[in-house]
Image: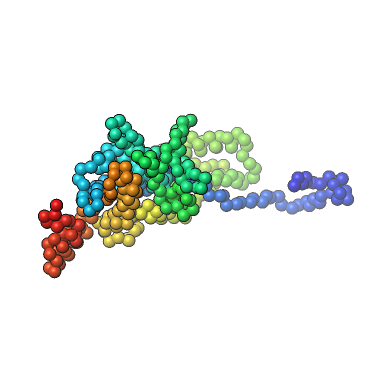
Amino acid sequence: MAWKWPWPRNAGNGGARPEHKSGAPSGFVALHAQGEARWTRRDYAALAREGYMRNPIVHRAVRLICETASAMPWLLYEGAAELEDHPLLQLLERPNQRQAGASFLETLYGHLLLAGNAYVEMIEANEGARELHLLRPDRVSVVTDPSGWPTALDYREGSARRRTPLAAEGGGALHLTLFHPLDDHYGFAPLEAALTALDTHNAAGRWNKALLDNSARPSGALVYAPKEGGNLTDEQFDRLKAELEEGYSGATRAGRPLLLEGGLDWKAMGMTPKDMDFIEAKHSASRDIALAFGVPPMLLGIPGDNTYANYQEANRAFYRLTILPLVGRIAKELSAWLGPVFGGSLRLWYDADRVDGLSGERDALWARVEAASFLSDDEKREAVGYQPRGFD
């Protein structure tokens, strides 16, 4: 609509003139609306940049999971027999020329946590040697057949593009995902579930930094109300603005007293940190991020969480509820993919007995088994995962 006020005489209003009332006080009406919240984009690059690279809670949670999971020792079985030396174990120990096994797995777990997807490609090297390489999730797309089943991966880097078949005979590629309730082919990143907490935590940090840059004080207004009335001239306004920016802005000028004259008065307009409950808002967002990743807040140094009695109990819960399920999931996927490549009924698993964080549970198990007088020595060894004596 393009209304024009006052209406002209020929606007169909009978030539009426707008009514004017004298003596009415002048004024204005200000309309305010709540601004729309701005959220981080739900893609790998944005989550990695705003989460892992700019948020200390996300950075520490992801590193803690990746470093702990990648340090888990591997076991390889063929049927019921344990294999101590095998080409598959050597491949996991040195997947490629650039990475050792721990670095390779740390990156793999990081891709899963930040993207919900991890892509591993097997390459046949010289003299029958094999190498494993990780593909960055934001450069990979899943290719499906006419029926919608995934068949290959398209990897793009700049203008170059190549296609690798999925789980083909002799290797191909492996696509690892975390459960996504609304997508058939791609996984769901844990960080996406904590996106609101992530943006809240980052916004609180930016607000605190801006507050420090602004003389560690909330924003306000200088009100000019001289007794004789009138307004500041343009020259006086520019001079006052320049003096404020040069003499009272910046962290180095924090706390400097403001000298007011000529009818000027300072009125604070910003909300104080207490009004915004600044510290508790950051701690609450931190706990939500830790919850999404499955890391006890106590291990991240977040105060106000008394879920676990002590640090040792929190560490055991971290292993049992987060690390072991994640490593077991990857072990089964790698077994199903690499087992047929090397032949035989090979099965990968982790060695929980060599994990220092679970030593307390292991000691308690051994004590209970040792106290079971109704069991023979071979039965006790079998109960704790060892083979009977004299087993070939």
Give the percent coordinates (x, y) of residue 295: 34, 53
Q: Which residue is at 64% across, 50% downward?
A: 30
Q: Is residue 326 visible?
A: no
Give the percent coordinates (x, y) of residue 204: 44, 48
Q: Which residue is at 38% across, 55% downward?
A: 291
Q: Which residue is at 64% across, 45% downward?
A: 229
Give the percent coordinates (x, y) of residue 162: 44, 34
Check the image and name the residue furthest to the bottom: 374
Q: Is residue 34 visible?
A: yes
Check the image and name the residue furthest to the right: 14
Count of labels shown? 0
Seen from the viewer's position, the closer of residues 6 and 227 is 6
Looking at the image, residue 121 lies above or below residue 354: above
Give the percent coordinates (x, y) of residue 183: 48, 51
Seen from the viewer's position, the closer of residues 319 and 129 is 129
Q: In terms of image quadrants, where is residue 358?
A: bottom left
Q: Which residue is at 46% across, 54% downward?
A: 181
303 displayed left or right of 181:
left
Q: How is the image coloured?
A: rainbow
12 displayed left or right of 252:
right
